[in-house]
Each structure stands twice: as structure tokens, then as C-alpha cells.
Image (cartoon, grey):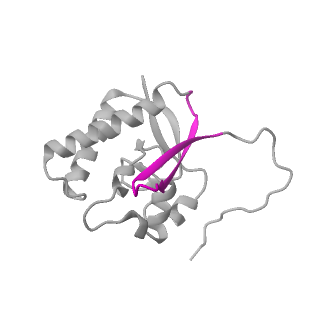
Amino acid sequence: MARFLRAIRFDVSDTHVFERAASPDSLAIPGSFLFMPRPGFDPAQVSGKARQAFVSGFLGLENFGFSTLVSVGEVRPEEIDAARAGLTRFLIEDFGAPSEEAADQLSREEVAFAAGLASDAPLNMLLAIRRQIGEDGQVNEQFHIVNPPAEKPHALVWDVVEDPE
């Protein structure tokens, strides 16, 4: 089996910090193309929940929501193909790709990049992303391995709970 990035949710925080949270266990890509400068869009002007997605969100390919963390998991080739086809449709229908060919090319590149991040990584490794705008005005991304604490913390500082509204 191939390895790929999967959205992971340890608590409900993604449902609060992003406009739409990625479906847990859905295939995911960095998705930085969403934030590249283009006519009518300046990533420096993004605010609120969209800003949180810009700074630290992976794009889930099931519902096109965001996840703070991804885990390296095993995936069947047909799952990758289906996710890539869905991304191509998203690029055409929701992102305004100029053609099906352009959308397909970008989706292949994005899926290949995500597969490359996961290919040699250990199963269940956690990754986080950090984006910022560089001095040249371009979006820069950095990936970080998230390591579990070596030992259990001695005191819980905070917790996230669902509001029963």
C-alpha cells in the first residue's frame, strides 16, 4: 500500500478555528495553492477563520475543509485516484480553473507532493504546516513533525469542550 496524508482530529478545536473542518481520516494535501496571490486575492488581507486556514491548515480532500494536523497513513491507489479526481472537480467548479487540463495538472502536482511528504515517513507520524508571506510577497510553507510528549504532563493547563448551545 502507498502512504498518504490523512486529516486527524484529536479534539473539536478544528471545528471552531476553521470555517469548515476537514472530515477526520480524509486524504489531505497542504493546499497552499488556495492562498497564492492572484487577481482579486491578496493573502496578506486574509483574516479570521480564513487566516487560521492560511497559517496552519491542511486541505482535506473529502469536503475541502481544513485540519491542523495530518497523520501518515496507508492508502489504496484507487483512493488516491478518487481524491485527485475530486480535487480536479473542486478546482473547476469552486476555484475557477481556466480549463479541465489545468485543473487536472494542478491536482496531479498537489497529490504527488503530498504523497512525497508521506512516502518515506513512518506510519502515524504527525505533521503540522506553517505558512507565511515571504519578503518577496510569495507564500512560504514549512512542515513540522509533531512529537508526542516524552512523559505525561503533570498538570492539565486547558481543555477544549463542546459548547451545548
Q: Report the residue at 66% width, 63% height from top.
A: 160
Residue most toward the front?
136
Viewer-proximal residue, 25 or 30?
30
The image quarter containing residue 96 is bottom left
Q: Position of residue 148 (x, y in %)?
A: 70, 40
Left or right: 11, with 137 as reference point: right
Q: As displayed, is residue 21 above or below residue 70?
A: below
Position of the N terminus by quadrant: top left
The image quarter containing residue 138 is bottom left
Viewer-proximal residue, 21 or 109?
109
Whether 98 is among the magenta residues is no
Residue most toward the right?
154
Q: Position of residue 154 (x, y in %)?
A: 86, 51
- How many callouts does the rendering have? 0
Q: Report the residue at 31% width, 40% height from top.
A: 83
Q: As displayed, is residue 42 above or below residue 150?
A: below
Left or right: 110, with 46 as reference point: left
Q: Report the residue at 41% width, 70% height from top.
A: 45
Identify the main secondary structure in magenta: strand
Viewer-proximal residue, 63 or 38?
38
Looking at the rendering, the stretch of residues picked out in magenta corresponds to 122-146
Q: As displayed, is residue 111 above or below residue 90?
A: above
Left or right: 58, with 151 as reference point: left
Position of the C terminus by quadrant: bottom right
Q: Report the residue at 36% width, 54% height from top.
A: 64
Q: Position of residue 137 (x, y in %)?
A: 40, 58
Q: Position of residue 40 (x, y in %)?
A: 27, 68
